[in-house]
Image: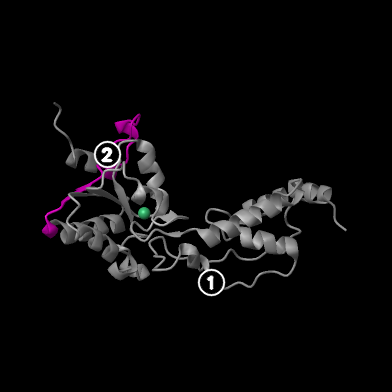
Amino acid sequence: MQSSTDFTERSSQDTSGLPRFPKPTSTPAAGATVGGTPAHSMTSSFATPAPRDSLARLVFELSKLPGIGEKSATRLAYFILKTEGSYAQDLAQAILAARDKIHLCSQCFAFTDVEPCANCSDPARESRTICVVERPSDLLPVERSGTFRGRYHVLHGVLSPLDGVGPDELKISGLLARLNTGAIEEVILAINPSVEGDATAMYLSRLIRPLGIRVSRLAHGIPVGGQLEFTDRQTLARAIENRMEVR
Ligand SMILES: [Zn+2]
């Protein structure tokens, strides 16, 4: 029987003893939607069959996580195996509990384990402004900025025809339904500046403006603490285009 010490030694020396397998490649495109179902279905299909060996299987499953290559997955697997106590069980239960309980808020489509989510049900938040973001993970940085106290709407991607992501794959109809209540005065498009993001912002703006709702977009420019010398050409061009009058 292999002891935890063995795992440690193998981990620190060489990982080549493990069966090698290609990192799964069938992950969804960056702009892909989760549709009307919980986002868990995003990682449903991987073409490569899971290895039978327990350790190799753990590495295989961990390497499916975004940003985790085979080396990192191997390091994580050894960490889990050599950690004392009930860590492995706690981790597995936390993953399963999150998967079972967390779903998309019916109003803003953010991840939540209550319905509606805390943002949508908070009476202290300003309800005439909606900040539209690409992904659920984009909510946190906007919240951390401390400057926005309105409501949110998560698109779950951006328009990307090459990846098969059209308006129907995003949460656009849900956004329009919220806007058609007449209670919204401004929509802030906090969509990432990219070709697809720009096209999505343009598309949404054309849909929303006729409703008599103000549409704004996050300014693009020089980061705080940045220097012109090290700013890329596109960012600087946008900063010049979006220059502000000094008052
Ligand atoms: Zn919500």
In the image, 182 versus 65, the foreground residue is: 182
Please state the extent of the stretch shown in magenta in the rendering.
Answer: 210-236
Q: In x, y percent, where is residue 245?
A: 13, 31
Q: Residue at x 31, y 53 (%)?
A: 194
Decide which of 128, 15 is in the foreground and name it.
128
Residue 152, disc = none
Q: Is residue 222 depicted above or below 218 in this figure?
A: above
Query: Where is mark 1, residue-wise?
Result: 45
**Looking at numbered disc 1 in the image, what kind of residue is underneath it?**
Ser
Let me know if residue 220 appears in the view.
yes
Question: Which comes before the other along the chain, label 2 or label 1?
Answer: 1
Point out the quarter of the image occupied by ligand 1.
bottom left
Residue under the image location 67 percent in, 59 percent down? 59
Which residue is situated farthest in the right direction here?
1
Marks 2/1: CA–CA distance: 39 Å
Mark 1 neighbour density, 10 Å: few (under 14) some (14–19) many (20 or more)? few
Q: Residue at x 52, y 59 (%)?
A: 101
Q: Name the residue under label 2.
A: 221
Q: Please tell me which residue lies in front, 175 or 217.
A: 175
